[in-house]
Amino acid sequence: MSLRLGLPVAAGILLADQASKWWILEVARLPEVGQIPLLEAGPFGLDLTMVWNRGVTFGLLAADGEWGHLVLALLAAAIAAFLLRWMARAENRLTALALGGVVGGAVGNVIDRVRFGAVVDFVDAHGWGWHWYVFNVADAAIVCGVLALVADALFQPKPGPKEGS
């Protein structure tokens, strides 16, 4: 049951992620343009800004060099496999759906690492002159999935005492 919930989410996230990156690279040609302003609302803004992320979340553990991106890709693939196994055993809908988001996002970023040696990041949110880390659809799905898993763990009703104890 849980794979039937989580796998379509993972596939949808993967499709949205790869389609958005294709559009950024092939249609908007963001690597050549650099930046496209989208929205200004008072002190807040949203731009498309091209960043080749050679690290992991928020650019941490940047892996330049011939083998660094492959090591990160293999690590992410191993984590995705572990999460798929967790998804198969998920005991509730929220866990299965959240894991689907994380897996879809992780696989999307693994594809980038293998194809380009880096992850395509392009969403640039900012306010009052401060810019958040540039991210992509996969990153957003991973963060939302992890937040849902944390919320599920914190607010899931605890089972009562076992009978006969």
Image (tube, rainbow, N blue to C red):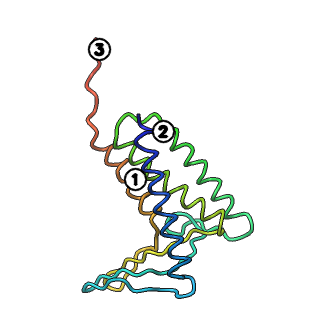
Q: Sequence order check: which comes first, mark 1 or mark 3?
A: 1
Which quarter of the image is occupied by the C terminus? top left
Question: Disc 3 marks which residue?
Answer: 165
Residue 4, quarter of the rendered image: top left
The answer for how far apart the CA atoms under marks 2 and 1 are is 13 Å
x, y (%) of residue 159?
28, 28
Question: Disc 2 marks which residue?
Answer: 86
Residue 59, quarter of the rendered image: bottom right
The answer for how far apart the CA atoms under marks 2 and 3 are is 29 Å
Q: Sequence order check: which comes first, mark 2 or mark 3?
A: 2
x, y (%) of residue 154?
30, 44
Amino acid type of the residue tagged 2 in the rendering:
Trp
x, y (%) of residue 62?
61, 69
Q: Residue furthest right?
A: 66
Does residue 21 lie above or below 45 as drawn?
Answer: above
x, y (%) of residue 146?
40, 52
Q: Secondary structure at mark 3?
A: loop
Amino acid type of the residue tagged 1 in the rendering:
Gly
Question: Disc 1 marks which residue?
Answer: 145
Front residue of this view, candidates 156 and 50 = 50
Front residue of this view, candidates 16 and 125 = 16
The answer for how far apart the CA atoms under marks 1 and 3 are is 36 Å
Which quarter of the image is occupied by the N terminus? top left
Q: Sequence order check: which comes first, mark 2 or mark 1?
A: 2
Q: Residue at x 58, y 54 (%)?
A: 76
Does residue 4 lie above or below 32 as drawn?
Answer: above
Q: Secondary structure at mark 1?
A: helix
